Amino acid sequence: MPSSPSSPSPPPLRIPRPLGTDAPATCEVPRFPPVRVRGGRYQLQRLVRHRRRAIAAGLAVTAAALVAAGPRATTAPHRTEQARKHPVTAPLRPRRHAAVDVVTAPVRIADAATVRLLRPGDRVDVIAAEDPSAGGTARVLARGVRVTGVPEPVEGGAESGALIVLSVPRATAARLVGASATARLAVTLC
């Protein structure tokens, strides 16, 4: 049977091309002379010539930064550390002249229960409370002194208080002994 002229013919088959053949051809980059910056060879000489100025400027900036970050002038050195929110600590090495003036002083505290709260190494304030009926007041005798020992209490000695051993300057030890004869001593933890 012959095909009729009015019948549609099947579409021609397309064969796929290999990859990369459908891209346009590449073009070459034309040759051009190298780009040269004027004065390039003199930059090193200029840098060597102005090196002293650069070093001086760097030192000035460093000095300004150190001054800005340095300690503030105050009346007491411990306030500087507190103002910067740094913890106030004791110096690592005690001063030689201060080590000679520090003595160990046993002190009787009126409240034995308070003494049971203390441990060696604690810092305390010692307060003398004189008899209010005689017109006495409370006064601080020593601030931030270190507890070096807490002896065991004696049986039945709770009425007379309890003993602690403090590391204090010699002058403060004399005040503590004098006040313990006329007033009741108490401690507060720092």
Image (tube, rainbow, N blue to C red):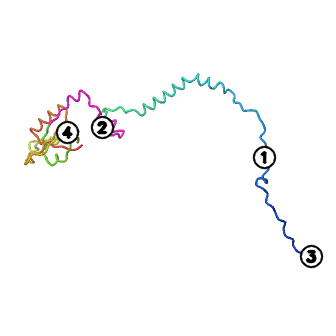
In front: label 3 or label 4: 3
Which residue is at a point 85% across and 70% down the rendered structure image?
Answer: 10
C-alpha distance separating marks 1 and 3: 50 Å
Going from N to C along the chain, the mark reached first, 1 or 3, is 3
Going from N to C along the chain, the mark reached first, 3 or 2, is 3
Relative depth, front residue between 66 and 10 = 10
Which residue is at a point 14% across and 38% down the rendered structure image?
Answer: 106
Task: Kindly state the secondary structure of the residue where label 2 is placed.
Answer: loop
121 on left or right of 35:
left
Q: Position of residue 177 (x, y in %)?
A: 12, 35
Labelled pair 3, 4 in contact (Cβ < 8 Å): no
Going from N to C along the chain, the mark reached first, 2 or 1, is 1
Task: Kindly state the secondary structure of the residue where label 3 is placed.
Answer: loop
Residue receiving disc 2: 89
Labelled pair 1, 3 in contact (Cβ < 8 Å): no
**Does residue 50 sit above or below 122 in this rendering?**
above
Which residue is at a point 59% across and 25% down the rendered structure image?
Answer: 47
Q: Position of residue 12 (x, y in %)?
A: 84, 66
Residue receiving disc 1: 26
Instruction: Say which quadrant the N terminus sits in.
Output: bottom right
Numbered badge on residue 148: 4
Which residue is at a point 34% across and 37% down the rendered structure image?
Answer: 81
Q: Position of residue 118 (x, y in %)?
A: 19, 45
Residue receiving disc 3: 2
**What segment carries the magenta color?**
78-105
